[in-house]
Amino acid sequence: MPPGNRLAEEFVRRTATVARLPDAAEHAARRMLFNVVGTAVGAIASGEVDSLIRLGQQFGGPPALLLPGDLRGLDRSHAALAIGSAAHAEDFDDTHLRSIVHPAASALGAVYALADDEVRGTDLLTAFAMSCELQIRLALCLETEVREFHPASFTGLFGTVGAALAASRLLGSDIGTTLQAMAFACSSSIGSRQSLGTFAKPLHAGKAASNGMAAARLARAGAPGPEIEDPIGGDAGLFNVHFDGRVDPAPLLDGLGEQWEIVDVAFKPYPCGVLLHPIIDAALAMRGRVGDLGHISRIDVACSLPVAKDTAVADPKDSHQAKFSASHAVAATLVDGVLGRRQYQTGRVLDPQIGELRRRVAFHPDAAVPKDACVMTASLANGETLIETVAHAVGSRDRPMTDGELSGKVEQLFEDALPGRAAAVWSAIGALSPDTGVAGLREALRP
Amino acid sequence: MSGPLVMSASTAMLTSLLHAELAADALVDAARLANALWHTAGEHRSNAVTDGLFELALVDGLPPQATAIGHGAKISAPAAACFNAACAAGRDDDTLAPSLFASLAIAETQKLTARQFLEAFAIGAGVSRRLASALNVEGARRFIPASAVGQLGAALSVCRALDLDRGAASSALGLAAVQVTGNARRSDAAYTLSVGNAARVGVESALIAGFGANGPQNGVSAIGLMLNVPMLESAVDDIVALTVGAASDARVAAALDILPTGLRELLAA
């Protein structure tokens, strides 16, 4: 373990020579890219980031690329902002469950917006994967209590540093310039959990992408980076400024290049936080047993502790608020028999039947309940009680989505912009290689 | 830990400034600050970071909307705000630079009058200054005030310049508030970039809120939570009393006369 003032340098130095990922990591990276391209296309098509697209159209430069699944183009900086935000906008992207990081959205924003015709397919894929791996490992360094209760949101905070790393790789920056970029990025990192339930949450991912890219371009343009010892572990580094040094830096470098955390990234089967996924699984199973929903007197859910902290919006008024409402997840699933993007549209959020059922749901946080589990008890008017136990939610580490399930999810996300194109896009991602550029992927994502 | 869904008291107070008539003293004070910061930015317009920011604006082909001071060239409004504020970084009162140059970039783009510009800057400066003075030692040790609280003042200024309604402005403040950046003990380069970024954040937060993006409704307390300053909201308790009031035409004219000629030339008559 190097001293705390050389963490960034060690990470960059050890990964700089990795031109191609090992097979398992590369397959994981391709699946992550497929998944997050899907969430970006879906959100762009549904207008989730129209405010950012307008920003780019009115205040940006000439289009340098088309947005995925869309015929509107933006300059690279605004494209990174829009794509990164879109990928995270519907809370449908991914989670590394141990670190609680959503790494791919900001990474996608940076690499997709910055890659030009000279970039090789594997270079894009490796830069994307390295960004994700760095974000995850940074979060794993935090003490558990800090990770779960700190007011910062890691998607933006660590995403900025990851995006700077990815962009630096695509720009061909040397180690010194990459460190300068990361130092700028550490001073440009944003992220607050006060963003939850508003557009500020996906904006964090987009800003991470664009701020990280800007840091890399600024360093590449010759601006000297901060003259400090280490942007991550130094006295004025990310860990000390945001977390008062409450970290164990070992996970940042342990096994780096040999063990890959990205293989444990889980994809979301439902468009909301992973804390809600076991509850939705239970509600889906419960629905088949209850019959008439009017017979339910109340529903009690024994759940993990963070459910009460992060998803406690009792009476959501719109899509963003509903994403942080555990009671909406239960009620909408029971009423509609499915929990997809439509159940988070404002019309369904304000539906009287769902609203009435939400008021009959109570949550009982329990430290003994893991995050991917829950026990749901439905008390019926006739005195009967029904119990559903979920040991591991779909999409969790112990029950990951299969390739087929992932393809089905992406097909659903493509239904408005690129209907029937999921297989073609998966094929284009599979074709990313040292011998190909990124034109094939861009073409597959062109409406 | 999600932000509140109802506008907080401090946000309600700040957004009440959007359409208020401002006191003459507040305008005169703002004009003096604008004068000083304008000259500071002009004198320090070239360093490695600002040169890099300007170069990237040109590479991206940004539209000519607002002036990059000292370059005789126009770039996009958010980029101009960022560039000009970065030029003032590290000098006296640079906590107010994001508000000043965000106001100016939008005023130039929207062809506002000097009075409209000054009113926009005055309210943002008032907020930024009060919040910065309330940062405790720990908060100030960790974060650069200009990019910890200055982006909120910048957003408020731009909301007034854009004539946003209170609902959109509330979101703009929240969107800016959750973008606290800037590690305080960095070198000049990171410091410079952080001050510039704060101006950009202020401009962009107001713009996208005007386009419909929603944000947390508790901007000031969101910053307080990030900086571990629980009572930050109380820092703006007096802002309405000290900022709102009457100003005779003569006092307004006197305030406008303080503004530098070069600045006034960017604005509508």
Image (cartoon, rainbow, N blue to C red):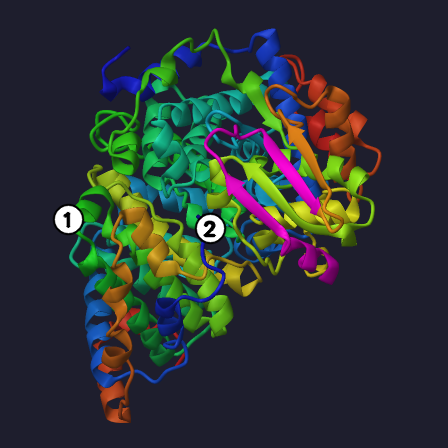
Q: Please, what secondary structure does the residue beneath circle 2 have?
A: loop
The answer to whether residue A120 shows anywhere in this view is no
- N-terminal of the two: label 1 or label 2? 2
x, y percent for residue B101: 33, 61
Q: Residue at x 40, y 58 (%)?
A: B202
x, y percent for residue A115: 57, 29
Would you say A280 lies left or right of A123 here? right
Q: Which residue is mark 1?
A: B137
Q: Residue at x 68, y 45 (%)?
A: A379
Give the vertical position of A434 relative to B55 (above or below): above
Place residue B38 in its image quadrant.
bottom left
Crowd tier of the residue under label 1, counting other residues whose Cα lies within 10 Å: few below 14, some 14–19, many 20 or above:
few
Q: Please, what secondary structure does the residue beneath circle 1 have?
A: helix
The residue under label 2 is which amino acid type?
Ser
Residue A361 falls inside the magenta stretch? yes
The residue nearer to you, when weighing A34 against A20, is: A34
State the separation of the CA atoms marked 1 and 2: 27 Å
State yes or no: discs 1 and 2 in contact (Cβ < 8 Å): no
Q: Which residues are magenta?
A: A352-379
Would you say A322 lies left or right of A207 here? right
Place residue B263 in its image quadrant.
bottom left
Give the vertical position of A2 relative to A110 (above or below): above
The residue nearer to you, when weighing A30 against A240, is: A240
The residue nearer to you, when weighing B55 against A213, is: A213
Q: Which residue is mark 2?
A: B2
Place residue B212 in its image quadrant.
bottom right
Give the vertical position of A385 relative to A369 (above or below): below
